[in-house]
Image (cartoon, grey):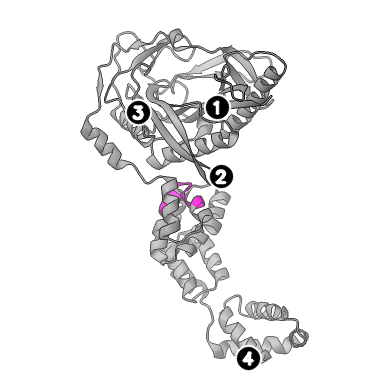
Amino acid sequence: MKYLPTIGLEVHAHLATKSKMFCGCKTDFGAEPNVQTCPVCIGMPGTLPVPNELAIDYAIRVAVALNCNITQVTYFDRKNYYYPDLPKNYQISQSHNNLGDDGWIDIDIDGETMRINIDNVHLEEDAGKRVHSEGSGTRYSEVDLNRTGTPLLEVVTKPDMHTLEQVDAFMNDFRSMLLYMGVCDCKMQEGSLRFEASVSVAPEGASELGPRCELKNLNSMKSVLKAAEYEIGRQTSVLKNGGQNKQETRLWDDERGVSARMRRKEGSADYRYFPEPDLILLNISDERLARIRDELPEFAGRRSKRFQTEYGLPAYDAGVLVADAATADYFERLAAQTNDPKAASNWIMTEIMREMKDRKIEIEEFSGKVPAHRLGALIKEQKSGTISHNIAKEVFAEMVETGEDAPAIIERKGLRQISDTGELDAVVEKVLAENPSAVDDFKSGKKQAVGFLVGQIMRETKGKANPKVVNKLLAEKLG
């Protein structure tokens, strides 16, 4: 018997606001524990929450981008549960009247479009976090409430995915969408983007899905894929051996590569949702919705297609460039400077990305050192024949180090390419006289000997000889 896995995802994203969802406390990552708190976010009696308008705008932006039906009159609920890092014992969230419902996102799987349906998009506040002791023989946990009250967007997909490839494509496309909109920094290592997978397995062709297991403690997209793969195998094995899977929440152990039962899976009744009495209705006007729709950027998929048609780039180049919005922006500025999109693409994908990797910096920091107009000037110097490609790379390295303009470096270091036929003729004659065996090799049919001679000429001129002129002179002299 064949078995079909079904996977749905819940996504939690910290919205990139400077203050929390219902108070003015900061949301900076890495601050000293419990310094970014106030009576509101830690739930002291008598305090009242005030909604963060920018967080609401960001949440609407995501719901619109996901093609959801927007609920223009909505409200917040109380989700009641006890947890050590939730001091007021309830979370302000949404359940009965979500901000967005019934959306979708298209992903690309092996060149074919697949639609992943979105169940809902809602806005809530995050809880704090526990810090567990790691010393030998110690068993205690501390609570850091800095994260409590941070604006948190939750996106719930329909159970539409059946393969790890589909899950991977969705996560990457969704992360790209958030980054393009600027609503989340998506730093999974800091917890600002978290995915939770729900997995069920049933016999192929069954009328109902199997009981689902929700997987927690997934700290990276790689962990999501590993956990889902393990859980598919575990549930399939249970069914093959005549057992029955149970609906439950399981913790993923990334080091051991296994999941373990945490608790039975709660239902909405367990949380005793009811409308938040301290907040009024949220009204989203037609004007606000229209403004947010107009502010949506051109996302990666559409931008990739435009790069291929407008700039004539191969699909691979376009895909690499649009993976990061800031990189795509830099490319467009550079292409405008050089009037040579392919050269701009090549420089970004080789020299710039290598420098960023070596220096552990992002494109924003790199562009502060070498803006597109400065790199464009360097590429123009190379295209005009003023310097060779190898010299251009040398100048580029100096630009990254010093921030100096390319023409100034070329002049200061005397790097202009030698194109004068008379000057190069003497160098060519000298190299031919000093390497008679290479000349004989060429005349006996070994064409690769020309490459050796060109190398010797470049060595004599410290790489400044114009290769086109050199090859022309050698062709004349060698017949």
Point 35% across, 22% down: residue: 98
Q: Nearer the viewer, mark 1 or mark 3?
A: 1
First in residue order: circle 1 vs circle 3: 1
Give the residue pinned by disc 2: 110
Q: Is residue 417 magenta?
A: no
Q: Is residue 472 left or right of residue 368?
A: right
First in residue order: circle 4 vs circle 2: 2
Give the residue pinned by disc 4: 476
Q: Secondary structure at mark 1?
A: strand
First in residue order: circle 3 vs circle 2: 3
Point 63% across, 30% down: residue: 226
Residue 471 in picture, x, y percent from top left:
61, 83
First in residue order: circle 1 vs circle 4: 1
Tag 1–tag 3 contact (CB < 8 Å):
no
Q: Amino acid at mark 3?
A: Ser
Whole-number angstrom distance, CA of label 1 to CA of label 2: 19 Å
Residue 124 in picture, x, y percent from top left:
38, 22
Give the residue pinned by disc 3: 19
Tag 3–tag 2 contact (CB < 8 Å):
no
Closer to us: 109 or 407:
109
Point 60% across, 19% down: residue: 251
First in residue order: circle 1 vs circle 2: 1
Whole-number angstrom distance, CA of label 3 to CA of label 2: 41 Å
Whole-number angstrom distance, CA of label 1 to CA of label 3: 34 Å
Give the residue pinned by disc 1: 7
Q: Nearer the viewer, mark 3 or mark 2?
A: 2
Whole-number angstrom distance, CA of label 3 to CA of label 4: 73 Å
| Number of numbered discs overlaid on the protein picture | 4
The stretch of residues the image draws in magenta is 319-331
Q: Of helix, strand and loop, which mostly describes the magenta segment? A: helix
